Image (tube, rainbow, N blue to C red):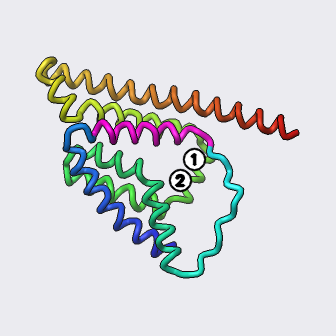
Amino acid sequence: MVLGAGVAVVLRIVFTAVVASLMLLPWLKIVGGLALFYIAVKLLVPEEEDKDEVEAVEHLWRAVRIVAIADIVMSLDNVIAIAAAAQGNVALLVIGLAISIPLIVAGAALVMALLDRFPILVWAGAALLGWIVGEVIVTDPVLHGYLEPRFGAEGFHYIELSAASLGAVLVLAVGGLWRRSKQAAHAEKVRAAE
């Protein structure tokens, strides 16, 4: 686990640097924002229990690879959010990684206990990701280049706040509806099994 987490930290740093530089290209912030929107909404949807047990790993490096890949896949929202919030600022990128990596790697159990005890934190986190989604999409070079000349810097600032607010509301609304739908389908499946 320690080796896997170490590899995951290195991969996350490289991955975040690549994503941060890509976010400066036209249209990629929109794509990244849409991916982050899906991830944020998915946070609110209960996951189905996996009935298959994970097979025992015979070799150390295979275990390291499994932990590292799982960590990178599960931390995609973290990487996109940090890269988006940094907006190309290397100092903010480093600070975001310095804060998030120890929290995720060392504090995973604490965070899970808090999320289990206070489910509202999941909703707050999803809303925060939704806020970032709105900012990321509207600050894409294509949209920014179109909107700022028409509305000025101050007008664009209000557009950015509106888009961020809309992103947070949409994440909560879509996630809530998806959650309700999934819970209803699960309840129906349980009734049919009885």
Q: At 39% from the left edge and 29% from the top edge, which residue is drawn? A: 167
Relative placement, left or right, of 122 versus 84 is right
Q: Main secondary structure of the magenta part?
A: helix
User: Which kind of residue does numbered mark 2 sit on?
Assistant: Val
User: Which kind of residue does numbered mark 1 sit on?
Assistant: Leu
Mark 2 Cα within 10 Å, few/some/many (few <14, many 20+)? some
Q: Which segment did they paint magenta? A: 29-46
Q: At 52% from the left edge and 36% from the top edge, which residue is drawn? A: 123
Q: Where does the image place residue 104, in percent across and percent down from the top left?
A: 45, 58
User: Is residue 22 positioned above or below 192 on the image?
Assistant: below
Indicate which disc residue 115 carries: 1
Relative placement, left or right, of 188 versus 69 is right
Disc 1 to disc 2, C-alpha distance: 6 Å
Residue position for label 2: 111
Q: At 25% from the left edge and 37% from the top edge, which residue is drawn? A: 27
Nearest to the observer: residue 111 or residue 86? 86
| Quarter of the image where one finds residue 72 | bottom left
Say if residue 121 shows up in the picture.
no
| Quarter of the image where one finds residue 193 | top right
Q: Where does the image place residue 25, in percent across and percent down from the top left?
A: 20, 43
